């Protein structure tokens, strides 16, 4: 498996939480479907003629298998209703917390679903390798060319063949902070890595421990440091070198990754910089990632590098907004013009090429579906360029969506989620945990390199 510990945690961010019911009125179909909550509704319309080329689909069924379970599944099911009303196709949705293991078992046994929502490119490649997945239809490929960047299409491509359109997305390259602290202290949001270092030093001069970090996560302890390292690898060496590093075309203990880890250490292993409100450097290993950013609220730390999903970890009465109790800024690149963004995402992979499956795949690859889904969810975004930012009600999700749609953004998928499981969700976690508690950089990168499958 590839990066399962991280993908399970991120699934909530990608799936979102159910907060908005839907009343779906379907153009040219006359059908509608009412949610249980009529007090908070949105009306959506789609053009049913786009499915006419697939023939009469009434009475057909498409099975969807995913790790997205109750209550996050409701927004997905609601977003499928316009397609069901248009075509007469029934979408049979199955959510399973054991999805990542069971989907491989089912595919290898010849009993896959019609469509799976796959949370990592590495798992997607494994599923394609079973020989049971089918290439995406031409209509889906055309939509992905229109609505996503080439980076995203590449993640749904295996051995030169395009299989899966992107779905939801998350942004990891964020730093959480207190807007009121910044205003009161006169701090400016940094626009370059050099600015970030200057800001950190200014906070130290103001008698603060600026950074709060926590990496404890049960068997997955250490994963937040992989995100730190990937972010700095992407910024310091560029996307092409990052890709080679992820594919092990350059060694893990080469000069590029060594420099990236040393740069991370300049922050997280510096006793003057960490661990605000939590302890010394070694406390990073015993502080849970869920708790690590909370000291921002009481002012004992000021900065916390963590993905967009982290908004859900603050108490429910916390205002997450640019003028609120907490917000986040983009972890800057080397300069103010380039925008490398680290993140995650989901992909719709089919195992059948029946007309009704192709039609459903096509629907899921449109800007129409992305906007309906965004309207049905709190906490869900897509890198689909046709997503209307105004459909996104959560300020942190708006920030993330704007980053994903920025023409200057160069997106790269989480690196350890693409590496072999023995490395990306095992050895790296353990070695980075040892590193933050005292092990030197050279030993750390050498140990990972030596463990890489031959």
Image (spheres, rainbow, N blue to C red):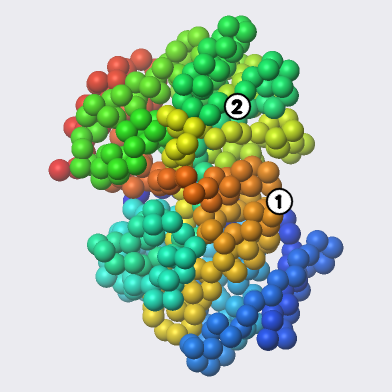
Number of callouts: 2
| The disc label shown at residue 335, or none | none
* Residue at 60% across, 30% down: 176
Badge number at residue 189: 2
Q: Is residue 33 left or right of residue 354?
A: right
- Give the spatial CA distance, label 2 vs label 1: 23 Å
Res 118 quadrant in image: bottom left
Q: Position of residue 318 (x, y in %)?
A: 74, 34
Give x and y (percent) for residue 78: 66, 68
Relative vertical location of residue 32 with respect to residue 383 in this rendering, above or below: below
The percent position of residue 244, horizontal first and vertical second, equals 25, 42
Q: Quadrant of residue 279?
A: top right
- Residue at 34%, 67% (x, y): give it: 162
Residue designated by label 1: 393
Residue occupying image coordinates x 25% and y 20%: 442
From the viewer's side, name the closer residue of 388 and 272. Answer: 388
On the question of residue 348 being in view, the answer is no
> Position of 394 compared to 453: left or right?
right
Q: Quadrant of the C terminus?
A: top left
């Amino acid at each position: 498996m590839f990066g399962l510990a991280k993908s399970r945690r991120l699934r909530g961010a990608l799936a979102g939480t159910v907060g908005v019911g839907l009343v779906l009125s379907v153009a040219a179909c006359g059908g509608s479907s009412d949610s249980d909550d009529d007090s908070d509704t949105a009306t959506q319309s789609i053009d049913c003629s786009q499915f006419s080329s697939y023939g009469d689909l009434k009475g057909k069924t498409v099975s969807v298998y995913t790790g997205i379970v109750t209550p996050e599944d409701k927004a997905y099911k609601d977003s499928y209703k316009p397609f069901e009303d248009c075509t007469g196709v029934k979408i049979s949705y199955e959510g399973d917390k054991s999805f990542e293991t069971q989907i491989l078992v089912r595919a290898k046994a010849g009993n896959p679903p019609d469509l799976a929502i796959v949370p990592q490119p590495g798992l997607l490649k494994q599923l394609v390798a079973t020989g049971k997945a089918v290439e995406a239809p031409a209509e889906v490929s055309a939509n992905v060319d229109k609505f996503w960047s080439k980076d995203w299409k590449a993640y749904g491509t295996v051995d030169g063949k395009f299989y899966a359109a992107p779905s939801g997305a998350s942004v990891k390259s964020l730093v959480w902070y207190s807007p009121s602290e910044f205003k009161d202290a006169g701090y400016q949001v940094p626009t370059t890595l050099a600015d970030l270092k200057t800001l950190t030093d200014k906070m130290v001069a103001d008698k603060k421990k600026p950074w709060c970090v926590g990496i404890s996560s049960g068997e997955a302890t250490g994963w937040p440091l992989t995100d730190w390292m990937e972010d700095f690898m992407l910024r310091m060496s560029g996307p092409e070198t990052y890709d080679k590093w992820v594919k092990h075309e350059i060694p893990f203990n080469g000069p590029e990754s060594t420099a990236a880890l040393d740069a991370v250490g300049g922050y997280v292993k510096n006793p003057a910089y960490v661990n605000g409100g939590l302890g010394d450097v070694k406390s990073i290993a015993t502080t849970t990632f869920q708790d690590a950013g909370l000291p921002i609220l009481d002012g004992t730390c000021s900065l916390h590098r963590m993905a967009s999903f982290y908004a859900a970890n603050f108490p429910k009465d916390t205002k997450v907004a640019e003028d609120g109790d907490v917000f986040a800024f983009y972890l800057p690149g080397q300069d103010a013009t380039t925008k490398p963004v680290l993140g995650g995402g989901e992909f719709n992979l089919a195992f059948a090429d029946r007309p009704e499956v192709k039609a459903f795949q096509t629907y899921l690859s449109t800007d129409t579906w992305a906007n309906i889904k965004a309207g049905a969810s709190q906490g869900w975004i897509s890198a689909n360029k046709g997503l209307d930012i105004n459909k996104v009600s959560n300020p942190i999700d708006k920030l993330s969506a704007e980053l994903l749609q920025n023409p200057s953004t160069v997106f790269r998928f989480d690196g350890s989620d693409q590496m072999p499981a023995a490395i990306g969700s095992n050895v790296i976690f353990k070695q980075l945990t040892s590193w933050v508690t005292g092990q030197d950089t050279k030993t750390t990168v050498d140990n990972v390199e030596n463990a890489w499958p031959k």
